[in-house]
Amino acid sequence: MNQGIKAGIVGGTGYAGGELCRLLLNHPGVDSILPTARGTEEFERVHPNLLGSGLRFIAIEELQERRDELDVVFFCTPSGEAMKGARQFVEAGARVVDVSADFRFRDPEVYRTVYGRYHADPELLREAVYGITELHRDEVRTAVLVANPGCYVITATLGLAPLFRAGYAQAKAPVHISAVNGTTGAGTTPKREILHAKAINSMLPYSLEGHRHSPELEERLSLLAGHEVTVDFSTAHGNFARGIYAHCSVMVSEELRDNVDRDALLSLYRDFYGCGRTVEPFVIVNDAPKSWKLNEKQYDIYPSLADVMGSNFCHIGLDYDYRRGIIKVIAVTDNIVKGAAGSAIQNMNVMLGLPEHMALSHFGL
């Protein structure tokens, strides 16, 4: 591209919108960033970590009036808003990345079942490309609208994709996923339970009757497996600000159990994702060797949530319970970066023909 990218952010006051601004400020290809706000908030008071950035909020109406100037527009809005506003930016020639859930299901009836409302633009919905870049890169490259996955879904799907593609999972057995995210996953609306004094020494389980990301997970894993997959999905907020820790248990098909061990699984994952930054730059497999001492607490063979904080990386580790025929996969990401703003920029880079790692190559804090 000859000129710098002009990026609009619809919904710039939340965690994802603020993180998009932070990352785009360090993007060498981005010339201007236009975040919107509903009210009269001052940008640097809402996002004081970006003090000195010079950014300011504009009204959504101003962004709409300037839509012909924009190269890309990100929607960081509650479900129900992107479906009403995306089309005008697409028709003006901008690429759109929706960080909300409005375009994640191709079938509008599935969307209605999960979110309890009719989709406002089913025709545009059918044009949307699902945006786990590592699994859908070719489709993302030519897309006009990308549906960014949910933070839980991108983490668990990256953790499980090699197993389901290779046919390891027993078809009729449910996949058990227990996932914990930081309190930023609860959004910016004040709630007593997520105040520091209440959350610091606690865990906050929620939506155990059926989390809204469960159907998204089931759809993604079913496509990878080639058969219907049932997910038993449990979620909680942990006493940390940001991050996703996903612990997945997969029952192995009977006919494959004799040939499964940790080394074989690590080899499968290395082949699938390549060696770190050379093939899939943001997926790292922890293949540290085990001591094989019975019941030894060898912590460093599994990924640590702290190591991905602030980064666009997904770290994956695994093991095999041979007595029960269960593969255990641990996947960790930063829910605001790889789970939202980082993966959105990764998709933008691919859509606009830029190096995929641009503005995202920094390691964890």
Image (cartoon, helix red, strand yellow):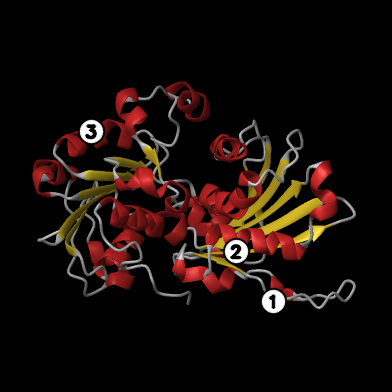
Q: Quadrant of the N terminus?
A: bottom left
* Residue at screen point 39% across, 43% down: 100
Circle 3 packing at 10 Å, graded few (<14), some (14-19), many (20+), is some
Q: Residue 352: x, y in percent?
A: 24, 53
Q: In the drawing, does residue 95 fall left or right of residue 66?
A: right
State the residue position of label 3: 87
Q: How far apart are the alpha carbons under marks 3 and 1? A: 47 Å
Work out whether mark 3 precedes mark 2 in sequence or the reverse, and give the earlier one.
3
Foreground mark, 3 or 1, reads 1
Amino acid type, mark 2: Arg
Whether residues under marks 1 and 2 lie with C-beta atoms below 8 angstroms apart, the answer is: no
Amino acid type, mark 1: Asp
The label on residue 300 is: 1
Residue 171 vs 176, above or below: the answer is above
Residue 210 vs 58, above or below: the answer is above
Circle 1 packing at 10 Å, graded few (<14), some (14-19), many (20+), is few
Q: Residue 50: x, y in percent?
A: 28, 71
Q: Could you say which quadrant of the image residue 79 lies in?
A: top left
**Circle 2 SS class:** helix
Q: How far apart are the alpha carbons under marks 1 and 2? A: 18 Å
Work out whether mark 3 precedes mark 1 in sequence or the reverse, and give the earlier one.
3
* Residue at screen point 22% across, 70% down: 28
Q: In the drawing, does residue 354 fall left or right of residue 140?
A: left
State the residue position of label 2: 270
